[in-house]
Image: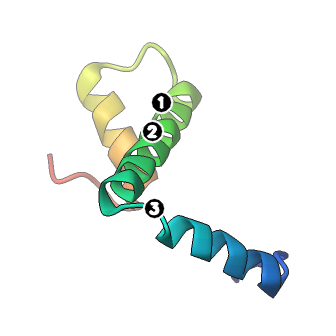
């Protein structure tokens, strides 16, 4: 179920502002959001996991499927 409590007028304004940015700026925004999400997931995992298990769990949380490694 997708929830959306943003009024259409505000959503249009946000979209307009986002599309006014250059391609490289939008890419950088996406990279920064992904990095922030990755850090939040890592912070939620046990600190004593072996590196391989940490990577597996990180992959599963981000991509929703078992890692191919």
Secondary structure at badge 2 equals: helix
Q: Which residue is mark 3?
A: 21
Report which quarter residue 3 is drawn in: bottom right
Q: Quadrant of the N terminus?
A: bottom right
Q: Is residue 69 left or right of residue 50?
A: left
- Compare residues 8 and 63 and report the one nearer the observer: 8
Q: Is residue 31 above or below residue 14?
A: above
Pointer 3 or 2: first along the chain: 3
Q: Quadrant of the C terminus?
A: top left
Image quadrant assignment for residue 51: top left
Q: Secondary structure at mark 1?
A: helix
**Residue that badge 2 annotates:** 38
Residue 5 relative to residue 22: left or right? right
The reply to whether the C-beta atoms of the residues labelled 1 and 3 are less than 8 Å apart is no
Q: Nearer the viewer, residue 66 or 24?
A: 24
Residue found at x 52% / y 22%? 46
- Residue 62: percent from the left, percent from the top? 42, 52
Q: Determine the CA span between mark 1 and mark 3.
A: 30 Å
Mark in the foreground, 1 or 3: 3
Answer yes or no: do the residues labelled 2 and 1 have beta carbons within 8 Å? yes
Secondary structure, mark 3, is loop
Question: Residue 12: horizontal and vertical position, in percent?
Answer: 69, 81
User: Which of pointers 1 and 3 lies earlier in the amino acid sequence?
Assistant: 3
Instruction: List the residue tagged with mark 1.
Output: 42
**How many numbered tags mark residues here?**
3
């Amino acid at each position: 179920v997708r929830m959306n409590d943003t009024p259409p007028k505000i959503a249009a304004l946000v979209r307009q502002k986002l599309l006014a940015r250059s391609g490289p700026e939008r890419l950088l925004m996406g990279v920064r959001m992904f990095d922030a999400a990755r850090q939040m997931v890592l912070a939620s995992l046990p600190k004593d996991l072996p590196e391989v298990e940490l990577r597996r769990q990180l992959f599963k949380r981000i991509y929703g499927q078992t890692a191919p490694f």
